[in-house]
Every structure is written in C-alpha cells, then in structure tokens.
Amino acid sequence: MQTENYLIRKSSLEKLFGNLIGNGKIVYAPKAKGNLALFDKVQAFGEITEDYIVTANSAKSVTFPRTEKLFSYHKSKESTEITDAANNTFPDVILWGTRPCDAAAFIPLTETFNGDFQDIIYNKRREKVLILSFSCKRSDEYCFCTSVNSGPGNTAGSDVQFTKLSDGDYLAEVITEKGQLLVKENCNLFEAKPEEDKEPNLAIVATRFNQEEIQAKLQNLFENPVWDDKSRACLGCGSCSYVCPVCSCFDIQDEAHGNKGTRLRCWDSCGYGLFTMHTSGHNPRNTQGGRWRQRILHKFLYMPNKSKVAGCVGCGRCSRSCPADINILDTLTSLQEEKPNE
Amino acid sequence: MNELIQKATILLESNSVQVVIGYGKGSANRTRAIFITQAADCEKLIFDSRCIQNLAVYLTKQEIKKLGKPAIVAPIPVLRSIVQLAAENQIAENDLVVLGVTPESELVEFESFAAIETFLSTHRIEIEGKYQKTIEMIKSMPVSERFAYWVKELEPCFKCYACRSACPLCYCTRCTVENNQPQWISVASHPLGNLEWHVMRAMHLAGRCTDCEACYNACPMGIPIHLLTKSMLQDVAENFGTYGPSLDKLNALSSFKPDDKESFIR
C-alpha cells in the first residue's frame, strides 16, 4: 500500500497509548534502567523513556523469545500425550518506540524462520505484533544503518512510524494495513498531514562502508589475518548475539521431570566455544577468530547470498554492549581496505 | 604514562616477553585491551581511570597464550586476580612479567608473586558503603521477599554469560552449565534457570572473588550481580576470617580440613 501521512499531537500520542493499554494489549517500550534503556513491558505512558539511541536489548524476543516452549509431553504406560505449542493462541503485542533499525530487523529475522522450514510459532507470534517505530533524531558513533541499506527514517518493517517535528508534535506515516487499522480505531487522534518535511527532523548517519562491496570481497577472504586481529580481545561470551535484533541461532533443550517434560528452544551464540563442537571432540571453529569470521560471514555473505537481505541492520548494539569493546565497524571498515586473496 | 611505554618497549626489544597485554584507545570514549607484539607499537599503551577491564582474564585464554610470554599492565584489581590465579596454580611466576600500576598511576615492578601479595597487603579490598547498605537491606528482607527481589533483578538475564567470560577466575575450559550428562543447571533463561546460574556462579566464586566488578561491568543488561559476589566476600570473611587473595590461602569452599567445625563434612 501507499504510505499515508497524518499529524498526531504530542498529547494525542499519550491518548493513543492509553487506548492501546485500555484494550488490554501488551505493550513493550523503552524503559530507563540506570544508564541503559531496556525494552520491557510497560503499563503507563510515564514509564517510557525518550532518552535513548537504541535500547540495550533488541525487540526480537517478542517473536523469538529467549526461551520458547515448543511442546510438552506426558508419558504413560499406554501412550505419550503431546501438547504442541504451535496450536497455542499468542497475544497481541505492540512494540512502541522501536527504532527504524529494529523494525527493519524483523525482515531478515522472519526470512530465517521461513526458509526451508516455516516456523509456525514464530509466524503466529509475528502476525500479532504491531510495530510503532520512532525515527531517530540522534545517533552515535556505533550507528551505521545507512551502510546497510537502511536509515534513521527507514519505514521498512514498521506499521506506523512517528517522527517528532520541530514543535513537538509528530508526523505519523502509516505503512501497512495493520497501521491503517490502528488509525481507523483511533481516528479522532490523527489529523491532516503536517506541512513540515520529515527529512530535516532526522539524525544524520554517515555511510561508513558499501555493503555490496563487502559482500563481494568476503567471497575470497576466508583466510585472512583480519579475523584474529580484530577478535583478539574477544572473551567468548554471547552478548553480541543476544543483543542483536537479527541473530537467530538457537539450541534445543529437553527439560524432563519423571514421565513428563517440555522441549525448549533457547538462544545460542556462535561466540561460544561449544557452539560447533562435534561429539568427537573436534571443533571446526576452535578459536575466537574463527567464530568472529563466522559471525561476519553469516551476516554479510551467507544471508544476503541466500535471501538478498543482510543479517545486520546497523544498530551497533553488539559493539556498544561488548565487554571487550570489539567493534563490528572496525572489522567492516578494515575489510573494505583488504585485497581479496587471488 | 611514558614510564610504562618505555618499560614495555624494553621488554619486547630484549625479547624478555613476546606480548604486552595493556590498555589502548577504544571506541567512543572507551579503552580496550590491546596485545602488543612489536616494540614500535608500545606508544599505543594508555592508562587512565577509564581502564577498568580486568586484563587478568586474558592470561588463561588459549588465543593469548599462543602469542608467547606476556607482560601485563596491572592496576590493583588485576594484581589481586594474579595472586588468586597463582594460588590456584593457573599461572607461573617465570611465565609472566607484571607491570603494576599504583592507584597514583605509578609504575611498580615486582620480583615475585609474593612481592605482589606484600604490596596488596596495603591495598585491601573494601566493600564500598553504598554496596554494604544495599547488601544489608537485602539480607534484612524476609526470605520470600528476598527471593522475589532476586527473581525480579535476574529477570532480564538472557544468559549471554558475559559475566562468566569477563571474570578472570572463571577460567574453567568447560563450565558446569555446559555439562549436559547430566544437565546440572538448566540452559533456559527462565526464572529458575537464571537463579540456578547466578547462585552457582556466586557460590563458585565465594572465597575466590577479588571484587573487581568485571562481571557487573560486562553485563549488557545492567544486572547488579556483583552484589552476590560482594556479599559472599563478606560472608567468607565473617566465617573463615579471610578476605581477599593470598598465595598460601586455601579457598574457603573447596578445601577440606579434618578439624572443620561443621559436622556434615566429616
């Protein structure tokens, strides 16, 4: 559909939030915690912070929870009863205050869960999510959305995007039918589109590299000192993967208690030493350098090769949260200078 | 710190060490661990109040051990970890050069691990007043309230294990949480799994933790897990009379003495 533009006043935004909560919707929004902002469930408009570049955690857990029950079972002498979580009804969830990068991240994330296998639980959850993004007025040196075909006002993935204008009111861009429905249900809050343009109200994010060039170079950079050099300080935790809005690796765990139990899908990370450990004890990625290479190749070579969309939206969370200050931009910009092996 | 740069340069030029583990410029206003193998690069070394990462964590990492004999830039928290690692036989005196940095930012060299211990005897671990207050507040809660407090605080934990990875004393090559036959600790980050992990972590560090706060600094979700280890430090001091690392000290919870005051252990 074609984007429809409206004006929504600052005071109406709070009313919109009130209507959503009033209708019993689950709303996730950025909440301040110490120096951080975290995506969390909110009940009151006052709980939401506006003071954040991006939240420390991403919003992916609403469709891909860190622990997802896939089924539960109950064994008896006669039979085994299985309760499949794919039959569950999942709640309506509203993501309030995601940044454009977070909204865009649902595109590659949804691709991953709809490749060779269509993940019913993921898709059921995704259908129930309404994404109300707020464009970026500020950025920091970790942001690089403009280098991965996105930007501070990118509307891809959002249902409605709000942009704060100079007078404190908001431009509301309605991108999807879900967004249209929201406007219809709250039509008294949306007014005729503002005069002011969107662009001057957006942060300026410099382009740091060319994604297509990086993708082409990575074809021939499997053996290169850059991987060890840039990951030397890596501690081998999963912080980068877990704050990433696109990372989707998981581990299947059975939690059994006597004759009943559950099968769980839990987040996993390529940063861990055990991630690719074989039963034989052999590990094809036996150093952090190999694991860092995998992380970059997966996002910037394998994913765009397979589905045309890169596995990175340039939010910079991985770098901000890294306890060893390993910076993905450092690696990507230095790759730009590498000459591929002949 | 010209002195530090000079000393590091000499060590590399004379091939006394093959790598200098220190702090260099990081992203934004941060510093980061750097691993210098060429004397000419020593000028990249910096030291100031932003250098809070505990570099001792790298002494046991296979990727760093491969680089050869290290020298390490060691402010007080790193020195404490070195003594504890030495007490646990994880590092050897002859395989390491310690470039100590005093709280006044002066370079201090050590002849031996024992000399570090002596130096630390005048720089004892102290739990800051604000933490003592919080710990007292938590300890004074009825059990159910305290349980609820921790369930809530640990709720954001998604088990990235940054706390474990950043800790110099979490050097096990295979952590208990990675043992799945049997699965001692739940892998999932649900309330029970999170509690199990953090309680185990704190217990494993009881009497070993040197209060460097690396775990808390590493946590991407800002969870106050250092309160657990700080509290354990106090408990160990109260019950076993030891506080902080020492070369000839037995670890409180992993040592057996025939005259232990507890009867269950005999």
Image (tube, coloured by chain):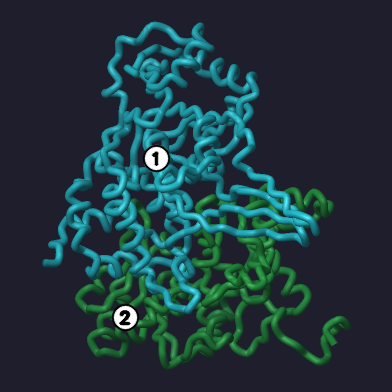
Chain colours: A cyan, B green
**Drawn side of residue A188 relative to residue B227, left or right:** left
Say above or below: A289 vs A173: below
- Residue farthest right in this picture: B263
Q: Residue at x 40, y 22 (%)?
A: A176
The residues bearing labels 1 and 2 have C-alpha atoms spaced at a distance of: 40 Å
Q: Residue at x 61, y 53 (%)?
A: A264
Say above or below: A201 vs A126: above
Image quarter hosting the N terminus of chain A: top left
**Drawn side of residue A82 relative to residue B56, left or right:** right
Say above or below: B83 vs B164: below
**Drawn side of residue A60 relative to residue A305, left or right:** right
Q: Residue at x 28, y 17 (%)?
A: A197
Q: Is residue B169 visible?
A: no
> Disc 1 sits on a residue from what chain?
A
Q: Is disc 2 placed on a helix, strand or loop?
A: strand
Image quarter hosting the C terminus of chain A: bottom left
- Name the residue that disc number 1 marks: A105
Question: Of circles 1 and 2, which is in front?
Answer: 1
Q: Sort mark 2 into few (<14), some (14-19) or many (20+) by Cα contacts within 10 Å.
A: many
- Looking at the rendered structure, whether the residues under marks 1 and 2 are on a common chain is answered as no
Residue A127 spot, x, y in % from top left: 50, 31
Residue B35 figure quarter: bottom left
Residue B254 figure quarter: bottom right
Residue B19 figure quarter: bottom left
Q: Is disc 1 placed on a helix, strand or loop?
A: helix
- Residue farthest left in this picture: A342
Residue A27 spot, x, y in % from top left: 57, 30
> Disc 2 sits on a residue from what chain?
B
Say above or below: B205 vs A244: below
Q: Which mark is residue B19?
A: 2
